[in-house]
Structure formats: C-alpha cells, structure tokens
Image (cartoon, grey):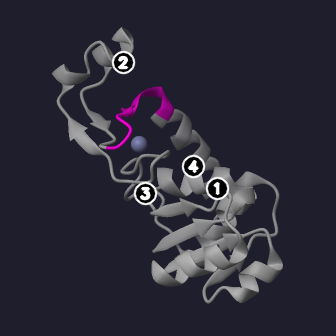
Amino acid sequence: MKFICDEMLGTLAKWLRIFGYDTRYAKDMDDEKIIEIALKEDRIVLTRDKMLSRKALKGLYIEEKDLKKQIERVVKKFKLDIEKNIFSRCTVCNIPVVGIERDKVKGKVPESVWKNNKEFWTCPKCGRIYWMGSHWENIKIKLKSFEDNLP
Ligand SMILES: [Zn+2]
C-alpha cells in the first residue's frame, strides 16, 4: 500500500515512512499532478482538501488537524501494521534503508550512540544513519499512545 500526502500533511507523510510505508509528499504540486502520480504509481491520496479526495480514484479526506488523530484515521482506515516494517525507510528520501557495519559508522555518530548500539542502517541516497536507540524508545511510547486509541 502506497500513499501520497498533500502539502498540508508533511508530518503525517514522515510518520507513514517511519512505519515503513512508501509515501510521497506532494510539496509544490497542483491537484492534477497529485492525481496523475497517484494513478501512475497506484497511490492513495491523503489530503486535507475534500475536493481533491473526491477527484482522486483512491483518496481519503483527512478532516483532523491534530497529527495523532490523523495517524489514527489512516491506520484504522487502511488497517496498517505500524510495527512490522518500522524504521525500514529513510524518513527524508522515502527509500528503504540498508544495514551498515558497525565499524563503518564509528566517528559518524555520537560516541555514546556508537557504544550503546549494535545495529545501524543507512540511507543509500542521503547517507543518514539510523539506529534504534532513544529515538526508537520515544517512538514506541508514542505508538503506545496511538494503540490505546485503536480498536
Ligand atoms: Zn535518505
């Protein structure tokens, strides 16, 4: 399942990428372009614009302004598995990250991070390095709060 988020939903797009879902962010695109990409790449249009959601073949109008509620709506609607592929995708480039040897990231991440983590991933495009660490813990806590509100 792939998505395209309109300009108003940049943070939602980032979260869907954290969950591992291929999600494009339609920055500086008009409605026609968004619909064209959605059709060509078989993506669901997530939008704050009711008209656009109706024009798209597959679209969901996101009524909520609150991020947490937006995430809940999408997760419920499409029955997303938010843990299975978590952190498998670069949140900036929207492409899958790949494992990288621990020795190769020494000096590129803070010393304490390097010492406390065994596994690292990197984005083949931008070179960002990912690890579970405290970021992971924070996200787990946030996810827990989402899950409490899920059926
Ligand atoms: Zn990247």
Answer yes or no: do the residues labelled 2 and 4 have beta carbons within 8 Å? Answer: no
Mark positioned earlier in the residue sequence (3 or 4): 3
Q: Position of residue 26 (x, y in %)?
A: 62, 62
Mark positioned earlier in the residue sequence (2 or 4): 2
Residue 49: quarter of image:
bottom right
Q: Amino acid at mark 2?
A: Val
Judged from the image, the secondary structure of the residue bearing numbered disc 1 is helix
Q: Amino acid at mark 1?
A: Leu
**Tag 2 residue:** 109
Q: Horizontally, is 10 left or right of 78 in the view?
A: right
Q: Position of residue 103 (x, y in %)?
A: 17, 20
Which mark, by number, is residue 151? Answer: none
Compute the Cα span from label 3 to label 2.
23 Å
Which mark, by number, is residue 143? Answer: 4
**Tag 3 residue:** 20
Instruction: Provide the residue span drawn in magenta.
Output: 125-135
Compute the Cα span from label 4 to label 1.
14 Å
Q: Position of residue 55 (x, y in %)?
A: 72, 87
Identified at 45% across, 77% down, the residue is 41
Mark positioned earlier in the residue sequence (3 or 2): 3
Q: Nearer the viewer, mark 2 or mark 4?
A: 2
Q: Is residue 134 magenta?
A: yes
Query: What is the crowding at mark 2: few (fewer than 14 residues within 10 Å), some, or many (at least 20)?
Result: some
Q: Horizontally, is 146 left or right of 111 in the view?
A: right
Q: Nearer the viewer, residue 98 or 38?
A: 38
Which mark, by number, is residue 12? Answer: 1
Q: Position of residue 51 (x, y in %)?
A: 81, 82
